[in-house]
Amino acid sequence: MQFKRLTDLDLRGKRVFIRADLNVPQDDSLAITDDTRIRASVPAIRHCLRSGAAVMVTSHLGRPTEGTVRPEDSLAPIAARLSELLGVPVPLVVDWVDGGFKVESGKVVLLENCRCNKGEKKGDDELARRMAALCDVYVNDAFGTAHRAEATTHGIARHAPVACAGPLLSDELDALGKALGSPRRPLVAIVAGSKVSTKLTILESLSRKVDQLIVGGGIANTFMAAAGLPIGRSLAELDLVDQARRIMEEMNARGASVPLPVDVVVANELSAQARGNKVSAEEVRADDMILDIGPRTAARLGAIIAEAGTVVWNGPVGVFEYDQFAGGTRVLAASIALSSAFSIAGGGDTLAAISKFGVTDQIGYISTGGGAFLEFLEGKTLPAVEALELRAAD
């Protein structure tokens, strides 16, 4: 992928518009409960300030109704936290689309919740042009919204004098490109979740690229059923066994594979009190629910990961929230952490598992993208990234 990078530009005296991802969780009193995304946005802002730019930053927050700004929609708490992190005042500008505010070189302002502007989510071109008129340089530093063709993620990039990627977006695209564009082999993908239907296109896309496709959760149960293994009362989508079987057959035909469980952990119910029983994959009973992979399977998958050149991870392979069903995900997390492979992981449950098992610092790259990460895995074109690529030669 070719795109301009913020760090390569001369910003002195320029008006810089940064689309960040400051969509942080808040409690009922609107106090920020996790400022990770705000802290992650600081490097781009600080770089622009040190370069002598006049800096404008905006983001979405929550799911506001366009045309109104309710108290819970306001970026006021984010402005206060950003000011603390940067060590400089960060005024909040409410009505900003048509200008009417000033920001001096070396200063920064936060522009109120961009999704409160009418036409933002639909990518209204007139709105995008008005926003583009505010700046000399547009910076997208919000990978989490890169799959959205909105005015501040896609439209403004087409009309601003210069459009580039900030460090967060650049790092994300570099990592994803390294993992999927030119991976070190063998390439191993771990895709797990409750339903095949929600990740079918991801599975189909990856099945054509990877050497080993490890499946987990309800997805693995569907693949097991497709292979003729008993799954009892386990979560599965039996109407998709044909698609699962086709993926396995196509991978086998080119010398790749979907390594299915040889043993599993089952229970009669899903609860914190449920007793987990380890059984062979051929011995799952009619009233059993498969809630994790077994130790022999975990060891086999760990060996595959140990030999990998690249690992892409999306989804825990068991109900890791309960310790009795967390063994498989724990082993895979440790295997990835110890592997010499380049690893990239994404998805909310995956990040929670990485945190629980203490391997955050041993994962090559942790994607913050959520939906954008999944769509990249599917092979889809991300509108915000495409807009930057089209402007690369300008």
Image: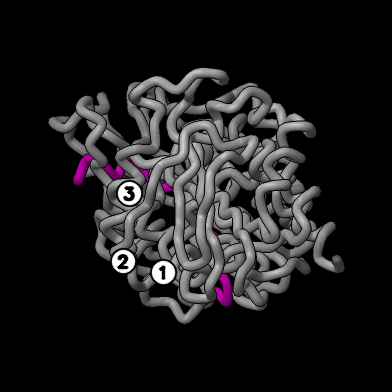
The residue tagged with tag 3: helix, strand or loop? helix
- Residue sitting at 56 percent across and 20 percent down? 66
Tell which residue pokes out farthest to the left in this image.
Answer: 273
Q: Position of residue 3 (x, y in %)?
A: 75, 66
Q: For the residues marked 2 and 1, what is the alpha-carbon distance in whole angstroms?
A: 7 Å
In this rendering, is residue 162 above or below 159? below
Compare residues 347 and 193 and report the one nearer the observer: 347
In this rendering, is residue 205 above or below 76? below
Label located before the other in sequence (3 or 1): 3
Which residue is tagged 3?
352
Compare residues 129 and 78 and report the one nearer the observer: 129
> Of the numbered discs in the image, which one, if any, rests on residue 359?
2
Which residue is tagged 1?
363
Q: Position of residue 355 (x, y in %)?
A: 28, 56
Q: Is residue 315 magenta?
A: yes
- Residue sitting at 63 percent across and 65 percent down? 14
The span picked out in magenta is 308-323
- Residue sitting at 25 percent across and 24 percent down? 269
Q: For the residues marked 3 and 1, what is the alpha-carbon distance in whole angstroms?
A: 13 Å
- In what quadrant of the picture does the N terminus appear? bottom right
Compare residues 202 and 143 and report the one nearer the observer: 143
